[in-house]
Image (cartoon, rainbow, N blue to C red):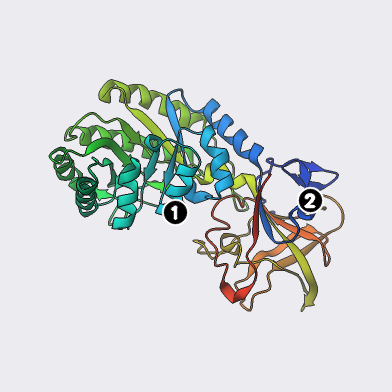
């Protein structure tokens, strides 16, 4: 019988005397500082290290943007802003957080298929770049710009006729609510040219959460070729080409870390070709999850321990209302376990197979299903790793009226 696949080595946090440390302190000490559980904790040095390592790997001349939808906690955005070259937002609320971080408007872009007039007015007034999702959105932005006496800064988000293969979420190819179909882009570019709007460039985002270098290379190659074709109809120089991101992290058993070596090598070649074809263009890699997900943990406390027909349950005060993604109800088709550990018995000590569940009256409230963990009892802390992205904000905190979790940056 073959062994069950295990999680990729989790090397972002030190383990001292078999206890997980986040932000330089043990999880139990951190829980005492926070004052109550459950909570999310984000390690600022782990985030900074990820950005440094990424810059060392990517070719010179590639700009790195942080997509703050992955984790829009203001303290996190304030920390990330000076480490990256720009911020990407997806709502007026996120725009306010981005501006509050001190990031210059010229380094902020706004994407999203449902921008209302309030969002467009705020974006045009702030002077950020609007990634246009439709011709109708563009026309409304121009009308708003005329009332404000401001020429909108716009880029066209393109829905290409290809997708990022093997990605967790496919954002392109076929009919999509995101962006303008590639075959419709030339007409929109001509309309932009006749309007007086400030044309900035193209945003071509084909997918996310990919762990296969060959898929990323194929999508990036297709992205550059599409940009060259569309540039023929551009109303002016392409100042910015956002090629998206798609860099994944390992969440589940059997997944391996993404090796960016070949991706970076290919991107270096493509970057030189792009400059030769399009001139002094800023090539942007837009990343969210990849920069922050592994720097975060979710910590909850065991409130009951029970046996049911041969299976041990650790019942905690946390669950899907705090961390929907870890419960398997945020995009998973077949539920798989996030990496979960007992805070003070990460690797050693007595082990047992248990299911970690929350306090909610639903069988969906599972944080770990039949996992081998260090033995835990009432009062012990359970830690869900890979929780720095799409944890707190993507969860239904109001479900069943339990208190919302806290968030800390350490």
Q: Against 308, is 23 above or below?
A: above
For disc 1, the marked residue is 93
Q: Is residue 190 left or right of residue 153?
A: left
Q: Residue at x 55, y 63 (%)?
A: 395
The image quarter in which residue 37 lies = bottom right
Sequence-wise, the earlier of marks 1 and 2 is: 1
Q: Residues within 10 Å of mark 1 (few under 14, many from 20)?
A: few
The image quarter in which residue 157 lies = top left
CB atoms of marks 1 and 2 within 8 Å: no
- Per the image, label 1 sits on a secondary structure element best described as helix
Please state the horizontal and vertical placement of residue 59, each as a whole percent of the image. Answer: 46, 24
Q: Residue at x 60, y 76 (%)?
A: 400
Please state the horizontal and vertical placement of residue 350, each as a whole percent of the image. Answer: 86, 57
Q: Is residue 114 left or right of residue 403?
A: left
In the image shown, does 116 or 354 lie closer to the viewer?
116
Q: Against 376, is 59 above or below?
A: above
Cα distance in 3D space between marks 1 and 2:
38 Å
For disc 2, the marked residue is 346
Residue 166 seen by the camera: no
Q: Residue at x 62, y 65 (%)?
A: 404
Q: Is residue 366 left or right of residue 206?
A: right
Q: Quadrant of the N terminus?
A: bottom right
Disc 1 or disc 2, which is closer to the eye?
Answer: 1
Residue 180 seen by the camera: yes
Q: Is residue 335 left or right of residue 98?
A: right
Q: Residue at x 20, y 30 (%)?
A: 236
In the image shown, does 259 or 361 lie closer to the viewer?
361
Please state the horizontal and vertical placement of residue 399, each as a whole percent of the image. Answer: 57, 73
């Amino acid at each position: 019988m073959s062994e069950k696949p295990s999680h990729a080595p989790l090397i972002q946090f030190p383990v001292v005397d078999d206890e997980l440390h986040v932000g330089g302190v043990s999880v139990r000490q951190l829980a005492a500082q926070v004052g109550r559980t459950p909570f999310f904790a984000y390690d600022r040095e782990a985030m900074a290290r990820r950005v440094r390592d990424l810059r060392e790997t990517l070719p010179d001349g590639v700009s790195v943007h942080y997509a703050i939808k992955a984790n829009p906690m203001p303290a996190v955005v304030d920390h990330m802003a000076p480490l990256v070259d720009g911020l990407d937002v997806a709502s007026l609320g996120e725009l306010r957080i981005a501006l509050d971080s001190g990031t210059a408007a010229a380094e902020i872009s706004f994407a999203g298929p449902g921008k209302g007039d309030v969002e467009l007015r705020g974006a045009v007034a702030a002077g950020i770049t609007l990634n246009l999702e439709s011709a109708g959105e563009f026309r409304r932005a121009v009308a708003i710009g005329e009332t404000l006496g401001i020429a909108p800064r716009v880029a066209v988000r393109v829905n290409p006729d290809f997708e990022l293969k093997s990605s967790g979420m496919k954002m392109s190819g076929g009919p999509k609510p995101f962006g303008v179909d590639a075959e419709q882009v030339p007409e929109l570019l001509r309309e932009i040219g006749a309007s007086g709007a400030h044309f900035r460039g193209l945003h071509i985002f084909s997918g996310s959460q990919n762990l296969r270098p060959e898929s990323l290379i194929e999508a990036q190659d297709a992205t550059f070729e599409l940009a060259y074709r569309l540039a023929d109809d551009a109303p002016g120089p392409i100042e910015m080409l956002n090629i998206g991101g798609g860099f994944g992290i390992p969440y589940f058993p059997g997944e391996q870390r993404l090796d960016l070596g070949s991706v970076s090598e290919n991107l270096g070649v493509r970057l030189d070709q792009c400059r030769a074809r399009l001139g002094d263009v800023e090539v942007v890699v837009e990343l969210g999850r990849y920069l922050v997900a592994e720097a975060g943990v979710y910590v909850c406390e065991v409130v009951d321990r029970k046996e049911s027909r041969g299976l041990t349950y650790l019942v905690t005060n946390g669950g899907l209302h705090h961390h929907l993604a870890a419960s398997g109800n945020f995009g998973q088709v077949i539920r798989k376990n996030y990496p979960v550990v007992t805070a003070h018995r990460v690797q050693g000590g007595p082990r047992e197979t248990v299911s970690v569940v929350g306090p909610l009256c639903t069988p969906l409230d599972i944080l770990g299903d039949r996992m081998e963990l260090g033995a835990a009892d009432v009062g012990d802390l359970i830690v869900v790793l890979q929780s720095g992205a799409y944890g707190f904000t993507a969860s239904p905190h109001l479900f069943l009226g339990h208190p919302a979790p806290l968030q800390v940056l350490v």
